[in-house]
Amino acid sequence: MSEETKEPESGKPEEQLTDPRTPVRLGYAGASQLEAGESSSKLQIFANTERSPVRAEGLLKQPLLVREALSALYEVVSSDFRYVPKDRTAYLAYQRLKKQTAGQSAWQAQQAYFDWLARNDPSAWVVLDPVVTVHPDKLLFEVFSKDEGAYAQMAIDWSAVDRSGDLQHGTTNVDYSKALFDGVQRIRSYRETKLSIGVDAVSVASDAARPPVIEKSIQLPDSWLRGFLQVQAAATLPTTAVRIAAIDLYNVLRHLRLNADKKQGGRGVRVELVPGEPPRLVLEPWELVIATSAGPFTGRQPALVRIWGRRRLSLLRRLLPFVETVDIHLLGSGLPSFYVLRAGPVTFTLGLSGFTSANWSQAVGFDQLLPRDRGSEAAATLSAVLKKLGEVWVASADELAKAIKKPIADVRAALQLACQHGQVMYDLSQDRYRFRPLLGGAIDLGRLVYRNAREKVAHDLVAKGAVKIASENRIYGVGLELTGKVTVTADRRDYRPQLTLDDDGRVRGAECTCAFYRKHKLKEGPCAHLIALRIAQAQEEERRRQARGAERGTITLETRTYARRLPVATGATGESEEIVQLSLDRQRLRIRWGPRGAAKLRVQSFVFGSVAEARAAFFERVDDLEARGFLDGSAG
């Protein structure tokens, strides 16, 4: 049997033949714009004529605040922080284009450039216009960045708008072009600014002044749409909430602006949380400690969480002068994080994915936290939730559970699925759910469950119990070495995938004995067996995490890393941090300790006569470290 005709279980499936994109039609009766006069201005935002009409109109009471919030929203939707290696291809293409357009007018040269961009870089056009939802209590804007790494939601309370006319509730897209962004910059405090959102932009003075009709059809990649839904659904997961002041976030951005990243060392932000003490933000690799000033951490358990994507926080810089408080919601180390900025009647929520689109390992681990369809009973609960939420527009999970008379756990699971399906939006700032269909039509959910065919095969292998973790080896300074055994009945053989994950969950090395890996290595992405091993390891980590607060008697493999900040000695110029790593491997216990950042840590190994004795010694040291004020950095 040839590789092309083997069963999907073999890990060498045919890639899907359908176009992995979702077509979206957008139509606007005119181009959104700002009409500025001497004493007043009109902000006209046209809504999508392909969707149900919405309407909102009124005078902005704080136009400068809205201007900066809309500017931050535009920076998010147009941002792209993906690494771009040095390449002369684009420059050479530019030189050819320059020769071809030498005798053309400016307009013709611009059209030639756009045509070239559409042919050679289609992803440059793949940006869904902002999603706007008119609700009884708020006006909401949602966007997702081009690099699939940042989600933003801006909410304007109706108390900030002196409304005229009735609201027409619903969800639509709005035309938010670069021209509108430039117009928004002309909003001034000494001019009254009138906001108008609708299909016909009712504030247009006359038909003669009406801009030309705009129609466009975009092709959203499934990866972009999947990322939008997943990052937003991640907000519904249990989080650790931390409040800091706006000046604390400013201090982080100021240091990052004045200091370039170093090639050596980490590039994350460690959040140290000790009950009763102000949260501390530690910038790597400088080990700069920023003690926050908004008050002590009110949680019950100490924690140490490491987050990434700190450069993307610069997208918030324009809004910071208006911000009163910043709430950070942390899911855990390497997982998405959310920043809720409150500025009077305007609330701005920024969600960061926690990993780049190329980091498949962390993405696969994150997938394990999100629910999947659970049968007909879950579908019935989901249908009831959507029906009720479509009537009331906004409600909490408790209110919905009482209304449809279902258990709160089932309702929360249904709401999380609804967020993944693009039907519901979670308002993290108010802990409430809002009815918001992302697209006008139905979303083909079957294409969004998995990133590619190999990932589907990997999940099938795990579900059938064909994946075993043969060994785990934790090496300080390197990470976790995993060796697996994947039994594939269609191939009548076992495969041996191997992974090396660093402390951040990123892949440092990967190999497999299958033909796909031998042919492509990782150039075409990981094989199904490597993905299956990572899924199995993520499930095992989640099982261990849940068992930490329960019965300790079943643990045989465990690694925990503890950290404690040492007091500053007299005459010293900085703070230091002590690290202790405990590794339990059946009858063996290994302890590593020393200052953070040291090339080598001191090591002490013990071998016990039984697993029970090694386990008892492991938890004895765990209790001692926690009693001495060490933070468990592996529990995030």
Image (cartoon, rainbow, N blue to C red):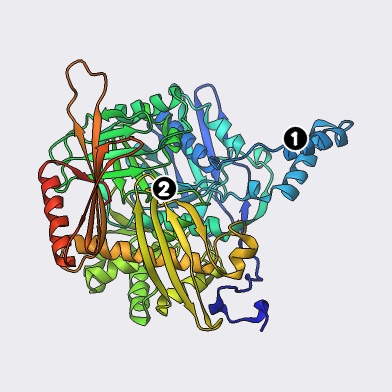
Task: Determine whether 143 is above or below 375 in the image.
Answer: above
Q: Which residue is mark 2?
A: 354
- In this rendering, does residue 442 appear at all? no
- Which one is in front, 286 or 97? 286
Front residue (pair 18, 45): 18
Question: Which element is circle 2 on?
Answer: loop
Residue type at mark 2 is: Gly
Q: CA distance from mark 1 to mark 2?
A: 32 Å
Query: Percent from the top left, x then y, of residue 399?
Result: 23, 63
Q: Amino acid at mark 1?
A: Tyr
- Give percent across and percent down for residue 339: 34, 42
Residue 352 appears at what percent x and percent y? Answer: 42, 46
Q: From the viewer's perspective, is 115 left or right of 11?
A: right
Crowding near pointer 1: few (<14 within 10 Å), some, many (20+)? few
Q: Secondary structure at mark 1?
A: helix
* Residue at the (89%, 31%) spot, across then down: 103
Q: Residue furthest right?
A: 103
Q: Is residue 156 visible?
A: yes
Dot 2 alpha-carbon crowd within 10 angstroms: few under 14, some 14 to 19, many 20 or more: many
Disc 1 and disc 2 in contact, CB within 8 angstroms: no
- Count of picture labels: 2
Q: Quadrant of the N terminus?
A: bottom right
Q: Position of residue 436 (x, y in %)?
A: 42, 59
> Quadrant of the rendered structure where residue 413 is?
bottom left
Residue at image location 67% in from the left, 52% down from the top:
215
Image: 362 above or below 104:
below
Q: Which tag, 1 or 2, sits closer to the chain's start? A: 1
Question: In the rendered image, which residue does mark 1 sit on?
Answer: 91
Q: Give the image quarter of residue 45.
A: top right
The answer to which image quadrant residue 23 occupies is bottom right
**Label at residue 426:** none
